């Protein structure tokens, strides 16, 4: 990231840098495709038993989270989501929703959020496990190339200077003021910390929790079950990490939209990113 390809042209007050290597760009979009399929097929799998527990075994009367359909006082079915013993009416989205051609159906997540749309556990698992392999291979390519090229140290690790001014960066972010000129050459400190957390914490942890749910892998590495505190805990952690990824995704895409959608999308597809210079930088580079 940040390889300067052309100097600011006098009077134009802008320059172009090659912001992302081809490997980062290709693996980023393959990863996005994998995560979308993994999430939607995962929600299909969740629907087969739409409740989560903690520990080794399912404690049916005490789920941490459950989605089901129950009749109300008039006898009409309502979708109910139970979180830590508290019930919420989520009719139409969670617990009870409309499925094209079938009408109102009792199901955890709605048809539009699952892959495939209809209830079909076996197919959901096929999609999930196939894309889990692509996700792992793609992730290994990204990690190996990032380590070999110094990308993580150079571009994702915050500098001491950035960490010292993190308060200012948060304040700027809240006011939607994004870096310009020289500062825009690199990721800002919040971006770096978010990417580090996703790349080195959330994604490896979700893969490990997924592997913990596989009885075959458990017999090869029983430590996995101990690490996650049981197979039901691993399932709950896997689900919560998926929710954390959705949250990251929403903020990430919002920031991409707010901080210059075309510039960002151009840089993540072709690599080229436009830097708008401030007056004093122009004076130095012109
Ligand atoms: C290497 C990566 C992954 C592996 C090995 C993996 C494995 C698994 C397994 C074994 C299950 C339970 C299957 C079953 O009970 O039949 C599962 C469920 C699920 N996965 Fe993944 N997964 C991976 C990545 C992901 C990612 C990245 C997401 C989200 C973006 C995700 C979301 C889900 C969800 C929401 C469920 C349903 C939870 C449940 O009810 O068990 N998975 N996954
Ligand atoms: C859950 C899905 C996604 C994940 C986990 C993710 C993760 C990441 C990560 C880790 C980086 C830094 C890559 C590096 O330098 O090594 C990044 C950069 C970027 N992502 Fe995503 N991304 C996701 C979806 C998207 C989507 C849907 C868009 C487009 C709307 C997008 C647009 C971008 C852009 C433009 C950058 C470069 C930002 C910059 O140059 O300042 N990402 N993403």
Image (cartoon, helix red, strand yellow):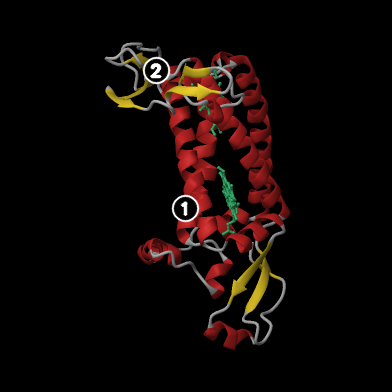
Q: Horizontal placement of 9 versus 220: left or right?
A: right
Image quadrant in which you'd find residue 275: bottom right
Q: Residue at x 66, y 80 (%)?
A: 8
Counting every numbered tag in the picture gives: 2
Left or right, 137 with respect to 177, comes to: right
Name the element at disc 1.
Answer: helix
The residue that disc 2 covers is 68
Residue at image location 61% in from the left, 20% down from the top? 125
How far across and how far down the image is residue 69, in percent?
A: 39, 16
**Image-based side of 269 in relation to 174, left or right:** right
The quadrant of the rendering that contains the N terminus is bottom right
9 versus 209 height, above or below: below
* Quadrant (top left/top right/bottom left/bottom right) for the C terminus: bottom right
Q: Does residue 151 appear in the picture of this structure? A: yes
Q: Secondary structure at mark 2?
A: strand
Disc nearer the start of the sequence (1/2): 2
Q: Return the x and y of residue 7 as percentages of the image width and height.
A: 69, 79
Between disc 1 and disc 2, the foreground one is 2
How far is the residue under mark 1 from the one under mark 2?
38 Å
154 on left or right of 159: right
Q: Which residue shows up at 47% across the image and 50% down it?
A: 251
Q: Are marks 1 and 2 in contact (CB under 8 Å)?
A: no
Residue 216: % across, % down:
59, 14
On residue 193, the disc is 1
């Amino acid at each position: 990231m940040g390889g300067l390809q052309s100097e600011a042209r006098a009077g134009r007050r802008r320059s172009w840098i090659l912001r992302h290597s081809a490997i980062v760009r290709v693996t980023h979009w393959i990863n996005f495709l994998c995560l979308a399929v993994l999430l939607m097929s995962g929600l299909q799998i969740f629907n087969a038993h739409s409740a989560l527990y903690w520990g080794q075994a399912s404690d049916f009367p005490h789920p941490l989270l459950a989605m089901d359909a129950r009749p109300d006082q008039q006898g009409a079915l309502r979708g109910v989501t139970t979180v830590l013993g508290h019930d919420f009416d989520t009719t139409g989205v969670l617990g009870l929703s409309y499925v094209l051609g079938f009408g109102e159906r009792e199901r955890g997540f709605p048809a539009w959020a699952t892959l495939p749309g209809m209830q079909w556990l076996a197919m959901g698992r096929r999609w999930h496990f196939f894309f889990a392999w692509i996700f792992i291979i793609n992730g290994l390519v990204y990690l190996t190339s990032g380590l070999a090229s110094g990308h993580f140290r150079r571009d994702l690790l915050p500098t001491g200077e950035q960490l010292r001014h993190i308060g200012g960066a948060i304040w700027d972010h809240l006011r939607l003021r994004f870096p310009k000129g020289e500062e825009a050459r690199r990721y800002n400190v919040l971006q770096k910390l978010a990417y580090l957390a996703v790349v080195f914490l959330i994604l490896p942890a979700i893969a490990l929790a997924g592997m913990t749910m596989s009885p075959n892998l458990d017999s090869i590495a029983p430590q996995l079950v101990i690490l996650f505190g049981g197979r039901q805990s691993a399932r709950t952690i896997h689900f919560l990490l998926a929710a954390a990824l959705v949250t990251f995704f929403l903020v990430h895409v919002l920031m991409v939209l707010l901080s210059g959608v075309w510039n960002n999308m151009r840089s993540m597809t072709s690599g080229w990113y436009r830097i708008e210079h401030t007056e004093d930088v122009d004076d130095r580079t012109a």
